[in-house]
Image: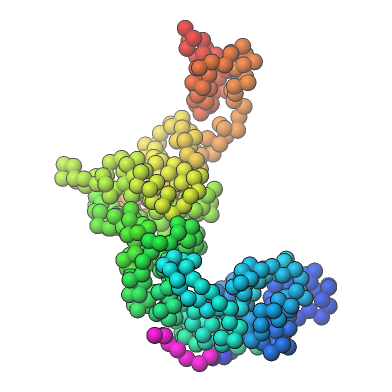
Amino acid sequence: MDHHEKDFVRTDKVFFQFYPQNAETERENMTDFERDKLTAEKIAEAVQSRGGRAYYVGGYVRDLICGRENKDIDIEIHGVSPACLEGILDSFGERIAIGESFGIYNIKGYHIDIAMPRKENARGSGHRDFDIFVDPFIGTRDAAKRRDFTVNALMQDVLSSEVIDHFGGTDDLNNGILRHVNDSSFAEDPLRVLRAAQFAARFELTVAPETVELCSKMQLEHLSKERIEGELKKALLKAEKPSIFFETLREMNQLDIWFPEIKALIGIEQNRKYHTEGDVWNHTMRVLDAAAKYREKAEHPMGFMLAALTHDVGKAVCTEIINGELHAYAHESKGLPLAEELLRRITNEVKLIEYALNLIELHMKPNVIAKAKSAIKSTNKLFDSAVDPAALIYLATADSEGTITPHSHTMYTDFLFERLEIYRSYMSRPYVMGKDLIQAGLKPSKNFSEILDYAHKLRLAGIGKDNALKQTLAYARKLDK
């Protein structure tokens, strides 16, 4: 069954075209995108001269119609044989076969994906379990039919700017709807459940009810973690409201396989003395959207967003009623095994996991220390234990912004960054190193690491190097007694 089938339409939009008068001179002044677009047009002209047509496809057309910038040019070549297309591409430079048997090419030095129409037949339940056949004469309707969503099934003739819309993608874009193209072909690829969620998040679209229903029946357990991570990364790093990704999966009842720790937060109540935004799920979704404003400030944006996602998973196992009130004491530490299990399920990047877990474990401390206006030594110690001190502050800020309280709410961001500057100032000063201790006559021993730790504590306390060296040597002598 197909949805919103219609004949192709022609829009009145005026699309940019660049035709240089003096090729060599103009090419020097072109941006990479202008050069790529010009090359796509020249390829289209060569294809047309041999009886074929070239179309912009996919996200490029979608974003063009929406007025969004998209410099990823994808073109699809119809009506010529693979050998003919290869000959054309060879005339433009070194042809690169990205998937030669699939009819996918590039030209060295350009950022253009060039493909031929394909048919796909599923032969298994995995994302890669497909037999793929090139069919240059399949026609635009059948070529568009194999795409996932109507908004991605749009095509635009490279030369005439004619937009071909067989499945109502333009209407769906205008109405903010994400709708699958074809029941049978869509259901062959379970990754499309995740793609629906990340597209909904990135472009703030509402998934059509029939698409939600179809996605709810699809099995995700055979997908690889690499594919899950890829879709999750797009949602967490490109969407202004990454929460839509998880809200969409929740609506589809598709959190169990890959995100059970997040699903477990649904219905976990919070102490209304501090949280009136609802359960831990609602709080987490608010924090995730708040964190999106700060992700580019983190040294590892993906790790930062994963920390925001999983910072409170411990509340699912340690929330309890004490003296008539809800509490989740030590949830930041008790949640670490749960967060690590989720992270290891979706990624093999050890440093990414370590980064996120470090922020999760420390996320409560910045605001607690700031509220108490603790001494510089305390904030220095906190920042020294953080893998990314600035990101830790931003996570604490997002945590606060994701909280709705019945009383006035103080933000401590400015105080914490003032203290971070002090910490960085301390760390920039000369300090006692192992070679200093050896030059002073100290011999390496089993206590050497402990002695260096003591020197580091003096550094955090702001003790000058000369004085710190004297105190460290005295400490070493005390240990030797």
Q: Residue furthest left?
A: 324
Residue 4 percent location from the top left of the image:
43, 87
Q: Residue furthest bottom?
A: 7
Residue at coordinates 18% horizontally, 45% vertically from top-left?
321
Task: Report the span colored magenta.
Answer: 1-8
Residue at coordinates 79% horizontally, 72% vertically from top-left?
27
Q: Residue furthest top?
A: 481
Image height of 387 relative to 262, above or below: above
Quadrant for the N terminus in the image:
bottom left
User: Looking at this view, is 457 or 137 the one in front?
Assistant: 137
Residue 413 percent location from the top left of the image:
45, 46
Q: How is the image coloured?
A: rainbow
Can see residue 251?
yes
Image height of 459 relative to 41, above or below: above
Magenta segment, prevailing SS (helix, strand or loop): loop
Q: Quadrant of residue 372?
A: top left
Residue 188 percent location from the top left of the image:
42, 73
